[in-house]
Amino acid sequence: MPELPEVETIRRDLQGEVVNRKIKSVEVRNGRTVKRHASAKAFRAQLEGHSITAINRAGKYLLMVLDDGATLVIHLGLSGQLHRVKNVKEPKVPHTHAVITFTQGGQLRFVDPKTFGELFVSAAPAEGEPALPELAHLGFDPLEDIMSWEKFWVLLSSHESGLKSLLMDQEFVAGIGNMYADEILFAAGLRYDRQSNSLSSQEVRRLYRSMVETLAEAVKRRGSSMADEQYRDLFGEEGDYQDQHQAYDREGQACRRCRSTIVRVRSGGRSTFFCEHCQV
DNA sequence: ACGCCCGCCTGTAAGC
DNA sequence: TGCTTACAGGCGGGCG
């Protein structure tokens, strides 16, 4: 499932592939993909004829800035992929829900079997209005918004909840999902159910460092492609970070640090993988 | 304020 | 073997 490292990998590749290209036409093949809009026609109208000037990211959301100040927002959900296609005659794979064709040639295709992803256009903000009101609820970005561990401690302490649910709370910090939450907590040596306001200063520093370093290393390795899902980059290539996983999807396997067995529990309807010996 | 559950959806896998 | 059920996941909404 694409989380921050996968979305950031796609963002970096998109910069070289679609910036300064002009959108010639947009085809919506599954209306659910643009459900925020009254119609597919209304969605298309805000894109066609406009050039893409920059690609940004907020948490797990990709942001394509257009030349009129509007932003095409793309959320990949659980199974969304973007495919950069050079030859428009290339057959469309199943679950291709939207196709953007560029004036300069080639296409960007949105493929999403589970249909939890979405595309929408956020209009250019009026004078004095904040941009992207749809994403105003998102918390800080762990790679873009660097802060002191003391500030992080203040934020952590202002909540009274389990560490994992807080890391996955997009209003607290944007971009971490079930997989990287488990990896971050392993790296920090902290259990998923530790209360956020119970950490020592040393533990807070370890958690902050682990969060930034785990995500940065995963970006370096171009994300994680697990067997049971199908994350692929713009060009259909897999990431490498799954080989570095310490906890996620390793139930019954030996902990790489202490050799005891990684266990799995269900918490809040989600699988959580951790080492009972290394994480306290 | 927080945990937990549901609904949304489809491919895969386990169970009978 | 073939049908049915469970499960995986993010997110928003509802409930206690």
Image (cartoon, coloured by chain):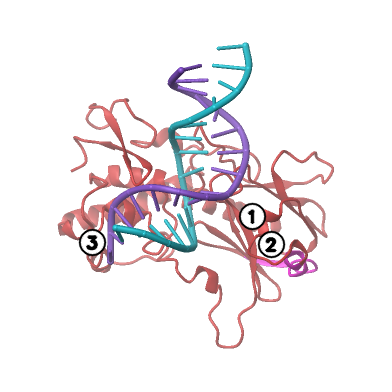
Chain colours: A red, B purple, C cyan
Q: Tell me the distance, in whole angstroms, between the alpha carbons under discs 1 and 2.
A: 7 Å
Q: Residue at x 21, y 41 (%)?
A: A279
User: For mark 3, what is the residue?
Assistant: A160
Mark nearer the N terminus (3 vs 1) = 1
Mark nearer the N terminus (3 vs 2) = 2
Q: Which residues are magenta?
A: A42-54
Q: Which amino acid type corresponds to the residue marked 2 in the rendered image?
A: Val
User: For mark 2, what is the residue?
Assistant: A19
Q: Position of residue A18 (x, y in %)?
A: 70, 58
User: For mark 1, what is the residue?
Assistant: A14
Q: Is residue A161 left or right of residue A213?
A: left
Pointer 1 and pointer 2: residues touching (CB < 8 Å)?
Answer: yes
Q: Position of residue B14 (x, y in %)?
A: 44, 22
Q: Closer to the camera, B8 or A268?
A: B8
Let me know if residue A98 is in the magenta part. Answer: no
What chain is tagged by disc 3? A
Question: Given this view, does label 3 or label 1 mark the residue nearer the observer?
Answer: 3
What chain is tagged by disc 2? A
